Amino acid sequence: MSLLVQKFGGTSVGTVERIKAVAEKVAAFRQQGHDIVVAVSAMSGETNRLIALSEGIATPREMDVLVSTGEQVTISLLSMALNTLGCPAVSYTGSQVRILTDSAHTKARIKRIDEGNIRADLAEGKVVVVAGFQGTDEAGNITTLGRGGSDTTAVALAAALKADECQIYTDVDGVYTTDPRVVASAQRLDRITFEEMLEMASLGSKVLQIRAVEFAGKYNVPLRVLHSFQDGPGTLICLEEKTTMEAPAISGIAFNRDEAKLTVLGVPDIPGVAYKILGPISEANIEVDVIVQNVADDKTTDLTFTVHRNDMKRAATILEATASELGAREVKTDDKIAKLSLVGVGMRSHAGIASQMFRALADVSINILLITTSEIKISVVVDEKFLELGVRALHTAFGLDAESAAESTGE
Ligand code: ASP
Ligand code: MG
């Protein structure tokens, strides 16, 4: 018998019929003897609808009072559906549990969870249904955790209760080697490490809220992504198990077409230049991703960085001003780029992954614009029109295609 935290997202509770189907699923787990805590999102579309209602009059504290109602609807309906099935259940809002957060309305962070009531209910054999995405600050104000925050609620509950597993039920059956809409032969991964999942998520695989993965990694909460209404093992996100697992070098290929590249050419090669260029960008709250500076050859250097595409115009205006101050030669911008990344903890111990990657791209005549690496990731920036071609080439080159995997295991 285990203690499980199960989270159901908006589409899984999108209609009353679906809520009843979720109730049956949860009741079946309870029947097997597990202790179950459920965290739920609002019915799909509901949070957006609530936000739209407040257009033009929104204030942070009242936004949280407003949007937290979405989840309150689903906890009550799910608990009623469970009770109707003869499975005793009780619902709690975030404030009722006392999911204590800071006071940063609409993007609060969880500080502590009082799990006493939940434990008492579990001991009485009840399923405990908790509203995702919300909490309360010290003063008793309702807070919310940012979009997609129900994932974080579930992980935080699992951490507080030391649950055996936090199961995230959603509309996909796991985490894939890459986006199946781009590569038809993409495969579901049986397992992936927290670190890899963070890279995949921050690079655009939107299965889980990034903060939830960070939280799970920090408290070592085994996290499993599963399909709400199809059976299957899903994908387990956990710590690396070096001893039992011969990790493949590459777990997945992430990509992102939301970035734009800015280059300043011919800046003097003196101390403080990178700071002078990037300082004003960060002061404007523009997030910078890749940064590359060239080796100086003629006492001047070139610096290139990428930002979110939506920020490019703003960044360019700031950069033009800095460039003329520094006496730089020219500023260039390009928003037709895409970033492709190989992700895998296995690359720590495998040499030659980078050259294998560059050869695969060369074989399909893709020109690489920028290259950056970290311990478990190699990213290249290429012309946007090569995105699909590049992802497919890499997926094949690193043996991630479904058929080649089947061949290699002799199935
Ligand atoms: N209902 C909230 C949202 O749509 C939280 C969640 O679903 O995770 O962002
Ligand atoms: Mg979600």
Image: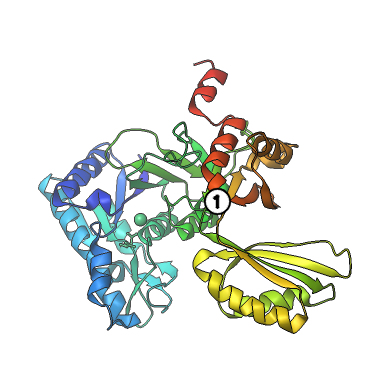
Identify the residue at image location x=41%, y=54%. 158
Let me know if residue 398 appears in the view.
no
The residue carrying pointer 1 sits among few (fewer than 14), some (14 to 19) or many (20 or more) residues within 10 Å by Cα, namely some
Q: Is residue 334 above or below residue 201?
A: below
Quarter of the image that includes the N terminus:
top left
Seen from this angle, which residue lies furthest left? 84
Residue 272 placement: quadrant: bottom right
**Relative side of 235 to 232, left or right:** right
Q: Amino acid at mark 1?
A: Glu
Q: Is residue 67 above or below residue 150?
A: below
Residue 314, x across and y down, in percent: 55, 76
Residue 315 placement: quadrant: bottom right
Element assignment for label 1: helix
**Relative side of 27 to 179, left or right:** left
State the residue position of label 1.
384
Identify which residue, 55 or 104, lies in the foreground: 55
Residue 154, x across and y down, in percent: 37, 56
